[in-house]
Each structure stands twice: as structure tokens, then as C-alpha cells.
Image (tube, rainbow, N blue to C red):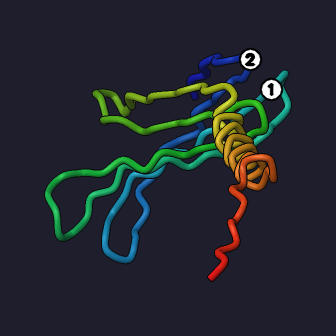
Amino acid sequence: GETVNVGGYQIQLKGVEAVPGPNYKAMQGTFLLLRNGKLEATMYPEKRSYFSSTMPMTEAAIDVGLTRDIYVSLGEELEDKAWAVRVYYKPFVDWIWGGCLLMAIGGILAISDKRYRMKLRKVVA
């Protein structure tokens, strides 16, 4: 199959086949994610057609890493058994969530600081 290079990775299409689902039929692609010729993951994006809807839905395959996420999405079938495919390389996505967690921890530490607590006054009756 065809191979595309994205972010230091090679993504190779091995094939597309029809697969049944519980309430849909789908075309499922098989993609190999390679780095320096070594297999890192096998990805299976789908183009689904649900029985209750006329609109097809795309299910992207996502390979999550500490410093990057790779998305592969199966597009429309073209002529001569060719497929339109979208490949996205997103660096440091997990670090965004880590930053949110770090801000929440900082907020909790700031709230718990004794210097900012108000002292209660004793009322003499």
C-alpha cells in the first residue's frame, strides 16, 4: 500500500475491508505506524454507515504517546479502489491536560495558605 511520512513516522495502508457491526456496516482500514522501519502500532479507522441514519460517520484511529498523538481518519472512497485519508500529527496534547492539572493543584495550594484566612473575632456578650 501507499506510505506517507508525518512527524518522523511512516504510515502505511495495508488494506480496506468491509466489517459488520451490531447496528452498522463499516469499511475498516488497516494502517501500520512505523518509526525507522520498526512497527509501533496498527491502527484501524472506520467509515461507518448506521442502519438508523443515512449519514456516514468517521471513526478515527488514535495512537497516543507521551509527546505526541497521531490520528488517522478514513475519508471517502475514490475511483480505482483508492481512498482519501487524513493523517494528523499533534505534538504535546497530553501536556495540555498536565498543565490543567498543575493549575488545579496550584489553586488548591493557594486556597489552603494560612496567610489568607480571616481570623474570627470573639463576641463578648
Mark 1: which secondary structure? strand
Spot occupied by residue 9 in the image (x, y as percentages of width and height):
72, 23
Residue 103, position in %: x, y? 68, 41
For the residue marked with disc 2, what is the amino acid? Gly
Nearer to me, 109 or 18:
109
* Residue 93, image x, y percentages: 64, 34
Under mark 1, the amino acid is: Arg
In the rendered structure, the answer to whether residue 56 lies left or right of residue 30 reads left
Q: Nearer the viewer, residue 112 or 53?
A: 112
Q: Determine which of the numbered discs, if any, sits on residue 8 in the image.
A: 2
Mark 2 or 1 closer to N-term? 2
In the displayed structure, 3 sits above or below 103; it is: above
**Image quarter hosting the N terminus:** top right
Q: Quadrant of residue 26?
A: bottom left
Q: Mark 1 points at which residue?
A: 35
Badge 2 marks a residue whose secondary structure is loop
